[in-house]
Every structure is written in C-alpha cells, then in structure tokens.
Amino acid sequence: MGDDHAGTDQLWQLVGIDKASMGTLVPALRMRYDFFDHVTHKPLQVFGNFTFYDIDDMQALYLPPQTAGIVHNVYATDDTIVNYQAIGNGQFYYENTHIGTNADDKKSSISLAYGQSSSFDLIWCGSNAITKLDRITRMGSAYNADARTNLVQPTMTYDPVTEYYLALDAKAIARQEPAVPTKMVTDSDENRVKDNWLKDRYEDYTYENEHDVQDVRPEFYFNEYFWEDQVDPILDIKDIKVVNDELKDVTYMFTISTDKNNKVTGRANSTALAHSDFYGHTYTYKIHVGIKPGMSLAPYQDPDHADEAKIDNEFKVSQDNQVRTSNVVHTHVKFRDPKAEKFVSADGTGNETSMNVDYTKPYTYRLDFQVPDTQKTLSKLVLSDPIEPVQTVQSVKIVDDLTGKDITDKGKLNINKDTQAVDWTADEPDTYHGKLLHKYVTVLLNNTPDLLKYLNKETGKIEVPNHGTMDYGEKPVDTPKTEVTPPEDPGSVTKKIELGSDTSVRIEDINKAIAALKAGAEKAADTAKKATK
C-alpha cells in the first residue's frame, strides 16, 4: 500500500500491512483488516503489530472487545500524549487537550502487538471523540466473523461529517518484549496437542515449540536471541530442526547444542540477527525424541493414574535478556507389567502351545518375557527354562525384540548337562526395564523308555510338558505350559521307543495296550456296579 491519501465517502477496504495513510469525511470510521492466504483465499492466522500515528487534536482509536482480546502488549514513548481508558472489554486510546503533532511524531503514536488472528477490527474516531463514547461503542457492537470470507462484502461503516487523517503500519515504535512461546507435541496419530498418549514406550514423538518474532525497525534488531528446551533425561534426542511460517528449513540460522543433562539450546547467529529476513516470522523449533530403551519409568508415575507414566516438558525463549516460558505439555504412556509366554514350533516363529514332533527333527521353544518398567531398579534378571531331561538342548539364544539383535553374550548362559535346564542371567539387569526379550531354545526329543513317564492315561498319548520362568527380583513369573508329543505313525521304523538292546515296541502298540486295559477296567467296574444292585 502506498502513502497516498484516500478521500473516503463510500465503503472501501484497505489491503496489506505496509504503512498507509488516509483522509476521511467521517467522525467515526469502523474498519476491519482481514488476512487471507493469497493462494487459497482462505482466512490466514497472523501475528504482528499495528502502529497508529497522529492520534492528536481530540482524536481517538477504539478497539471492540473481539479485537482487544487478541492484543497482548501496547507500546508508547515516555512523552506520549495518548491516553487510555477501558470501556467494558474494549480499549479506548485518545488525546483530549487539542495538542497537534506532525504525522510521524512518535509521541502521538501507539503500537499494538497482537497474537494469532485472521482479522483486526477497530473504530477510528475524529475530533471530540471522548464526548461520543456511546455512539462509538454502538458501532462496534455488531460483529460478523465471516463477513469477508467471500472477498466482496464491505468491512466498514461510517457517518460522514468532516475530514480527518490517520496513518498506520506494522512496525512498532519501541523495543518490544518477546511474545510468550507456545509448546505442542505430535506423535504418530496425534497432531499438535498439549497432552498426548503413546501407543507404547517405543513410539517416538516430537516437541513443536512455536515463537512469534515480531517485525521490528532496524534500530530495534535484537542483540541476542536464543531458546532452551530442558528435554527430560529419560528421552533420546533423535533430531532437531527449525522451520519458519513459510515451512522453510532455517536451522542454519541457529547454533544448536545439547549438554550432558539433555538441555537443548538454539542461539540465533549474528548474521541472522542483523538481517531483516529474521524478523516478522513464526519459528517452530522441532525436537524429535523417544523414551530410552531399558530405562525405568517408575519415577514418572502419574499421581492421578497409577497405571501410567507422565513426562512433562516446557520451553523458554530469551530475547535481549527478557525470558518467556511456554505452557507445559504432558506425554503419557502405559506401564508394561511383567508377562511370560511360551510357544513351540519347528523354527520358533509359531504361536502354538502344542506340537507333534519327530525324534530326528529339532524343534524350538520360544519364550517371550516382558520385563516390567514399574520397578525403580532391577537387581536381577534371570530367564529360566527347565527343559525335560528326555530332550537334548541343541542351541540357545536371547534376542532383544526392539533391535532384533542377539544379546546372549550380554549375560551368562548355563545349560545343565544332567537335567538340560537352561538359565540366562543378565549382566546388567537394570538396563532392561520395559524390554521384551525372546529366548529361543532348540531341542531334540530323545528316543528313550523314559518317555513313558509322560504318558497321559486319559488320552493314551505321551505328552512332554515344558514351561519357563522370569525372575526380576520380585515374585517370579511363569509361562503357561507347552506340550510336545512323539510320533504314532506305524509306517515309520524310526518312530518307536527303545525298550532295551534286544527288544523294541512301537508306540502305537503301547497305545493299543493301554486302550485295551482302560476298556477292561471300565467293563469290570460296570459289572461290579450291576452286581451290587
């Protein structure tokens, strides 16, 4: 917008926020500035300043409540002639002694710093405005928030009497205080919220710290500008990036460091501070984090929810030694309770709890141990599997579910040669809080008469049971039982139980004999029952 005067005797609109001045033939002119995205033509939330000049000679400015609510700071010089009066929830700025000034005289000017808004509604008042307050406030009573969404409806009302002058621009007349930053948090399914709930402790999330840097005159460029985020030590910092309101990556404008206590500091470099491009933008400082694997969440127990942890965070901005602190955000995550499960399959990938096996083919038990994250410390972590002695252990490995890595060498593995029991004891148990560990034990079923000890008389089948245990210093947690059954196929010469050096009996023959004995016992019981009648 240029600096030409505009005679105003009809409804019109002013577009843009560069310095503009106008003449008008009204004692009170209501104006509304609407901000739109120039591509989509949709209302656009902006922040900034409105500086009003030449409020002299009994003239005034009135902000209706809807606009006064978004103004967070007002700036004037020490020798200002502008007065202030609250009218309800509105704001009235005026000169009441007929003092005249030059158009650019700062003592007849005020700067209003406003927060995010897509419109700015005001009433500019001509001479003797202080005597017409009722009339002025009535002009501001009706407000249509959607009046300009189609870009054709007018935004002003007026009452012509005489000609007055007003000028305004978007840069403050004084050095400003920093705006209060806003902190939000985003995860995989929650976007820019103040409280987020993680799916589990392994879900990453991002702190999004926003700060509005006002557009200022060169004489008010900052000497220093930096931000701090004390990221909780339980979090891994995975990435840090700075973007502006144009979605440009401007990380290069800052020197960013992280200290040993996880405090992240971003300091604007001198080149950025000395250039106009730095000012008049909203910056978002994005810090991508995740809960450190293996660390206890017990110290973060939410006092209002015993089954979950809560991690808090806030953000600070310092502008020329003036510090502002954001709101606090809260990240919630459910605790992982201890749990133990066991499965058996050919290669350890299945989820079955029973299996028919062959003497010549190895099979694998998979034990899933969920280590709890509700303990402040873990003094021990032992994963046990008392393999039945009719089986021979072929191999054992421990795998971290999160990384998929074999961590068997991170503990002591013991296989009892006599009983075949398998124990793994972690070297550093306190590093396994909340972890899911898989124990794979590959075994081979022995062809031995000892299998008869596992004969189920109800089913007539040999069923070799197995279970595992996790001991983390509290009450040990057992897995459910699994069972394996040797073959019954009469066509396989290798599938039989060896009874001695000279004699062998097929397992199907044993089953038939057991069935016959059961039938005979049932018949005898039935005969005895009839005899007593």
Image (cartoon, grey):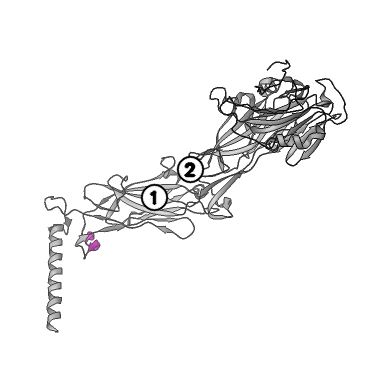
Residue 13, image x and y in percent? 65, 23
How packed is label 2: few (under 14 Cα within 10 Å), some, or many (20 or more)?
some
Q: Identify the image quadrant of the C terminus.
A: bottom left
Q: Choose top left, top right, bottom left or bottom right for residue 53.
A: top right
Occupied quadrant, residue 55: top right
Please report the residue visible at 75 percent of the width from the left and 35 percent of the height from the top.
135
State the residue at coordinates (83%, 22%).
105
Question: Residue 464 versus residue 8: which sits nearer the camera?
Answer: 8
Q: Is residue 266 above or below residue 380?
A: above
- Work out whether mark 2 precedes mark 1 in sequence or the reverse, and give the earlier one: 2
Residue designated by label 2: 202
Q: In the rendered structure, does residue 369 fall within the stretch colored magenta?
A: no
Identify the mark at residue 368; answer none if there is no mark: 1
Vertically, is 106 above or below 142? above
Residue stretch in magenta: 445-456
Give x and y (percent) for residue 326. 66, 39
Q: Where's residue 268, x and y in %? A: 67, 26
Q: Tell me if residue 285 can be seen.
A: yes
| Amino acid bearing label 2 | Tyr
Give left or right: position of 531 versus 411: left
Q: Nearer the viewer, residue 417 or 464?
A: 464
Left or right: 106 in relation to 502:
right
Residue 451 magenta: yes
Callout 2 secondary element: loop
Location of the N terminus by quadrant is top right
- Mark nearest the camera among 2 and 1 is 2
Label 1: which secondary element: strand
